[in-house]
Image: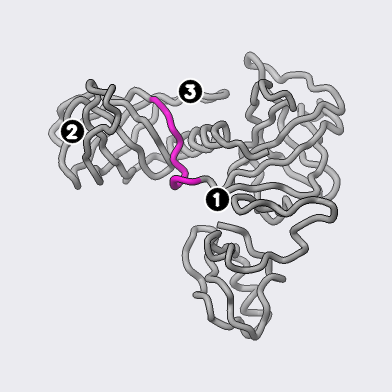
Amino acid sequence: MIPVRKTDVVLGKPLPYSLYDQNNKLLLKAGVVVQTQNQLDVLSERGLYRDRMAANQVQAPSSIVPDGEPAPDKDGILLDLEDIRLQVGDLLQLQGVATDAPRHAVKLLGYAKGRSVMVTPPMVDGAYAMVKQDAAFVVRFFSGKSVYAFPAHVLKMSNTPFPYLHLSYPKKVRGMRVRRAQRASVRLISSVTDMYGALYAGTLVDISKGGALLAAKAALGEIGDLLQLKFRLQFDDIDQFVHVKAGIRSVRSNPEPESETLALHHGLEFVEVQGSDRLALSAYTYQKLIEASDVA
């Protein structure tokens, strides 16, 4: 979904695309006329977004393409940072400009439009790393169904009242829609308990916030059955065993001919996830999606 500004909606004229809120719920269908500014203000409080496929059929406002920069290709967009609606505490990723530079997860502390973006410093071996002034990075992050990136350099590293970085504020942020419904390729060993208490082993081969693909030696149940999964997530400073209840939505043969030991794929939908596990699962999925992206 692509964020929509209030100024993109023309009062008194039919909408060229449907509008959705931040939870992807339909607000107004294409063709509906927004009559008053008050109506638009009320709608915008829930966040305004439009579907990329519909948006590609509409000419984008010229204001999102900065002077002297090429327009994004069909898979990319250029946006102002403040239009992406990042929240304090959101995970970002810093990578040095070298192609083989390590990637470090940091958290957003805030930003001042046109001045700086404030983030926590990278962690190395459990301690904050010292970052030199003017050090250059590519900043990547995930929001909605898109991954975003922009170049930045360190304006200043402060140590009081706690360590944090001031990064240069981006003129524009490049975004790219993540395909395949936000599923990240993984290989996570999972213990599985079926509806009758029998215990199995399986391997998660892809994962999202809402479900996963589980490979196993044999069928673990039928479509509609519930399974209990337990698997370990290790990344950055998180090391957590996650417990989820999942429903089987599909069972099919593993398309990989060399994977005879994991003969069946189970499409799972997570139906019950505890709060702390949900946060870890979301952060892990976003991290893997960012690592797999080539947006820069």
Residue type at tag 2: Leu
Q: Quadrant of residue 15?
A: bottom right
Q: Image height check: is 69 above or below 21? A: above
Q: Position of residue 118 (x, y in %)?
A: 76, 38
| Magenta segment boundaries in residue numbering | 179-187
Q: Tell me the mark number nearer the camera, choosing from 1 and 3.
A: 1
Q: Earlier in the sequence, mark 1 or mark 2?
A: 1
Q: Is residue 280 left or right of residue 163?
A: left
Q: Secondary structure at mark 1?
A: loop
Q: Which residue is mark 1?
A: 144
Q: How many numbered badges does the structure rendering display?
A: 3
Q: Is residue 163 left or right of residue 279?
A: right
Q: Quadrant of residue 254?
A: top left
Q: Position of residue 114 (x, y in %)?
A: 84, 49
Q: Secondary structure at mark 2?
A: loop
Which dot marks residue 234? 3
Is there CB contact under 8 Å for labels 2 and 3?
A: no
Residue type at tag 3: Gln
Residue type at tag 1: Gly
Is there CB contact under 8 Å for labels 1 and 3?
A: no
Gap in angstroms between the C-alphas marked 1 and 3: 23 Å
Q: Residues within 10 Å of mark 3 (few under 14, many from 20)?
A: few
Q: Image height check: is 81 above or below 207? A: below
The N terminus: image quadrant: bottom right
Gap in angstroms between the C-alphas marked 2 and 3: 26 Å
Q: Earlier in the sequence, mark 2 or mark 3?
A: 2
Which residue corresponds to the image point at 82% horizontal and 39% vertical from the top-left? 168
Q: Which residue is mark 2?
A: 220
Gap in angstroms between the C-alphas marked 1 and 2: 32 Å
Q: Earlier in the sequence, mark 1 or mark 3?
A: 1
Q: Secondary structure at mark 3?
A: strand
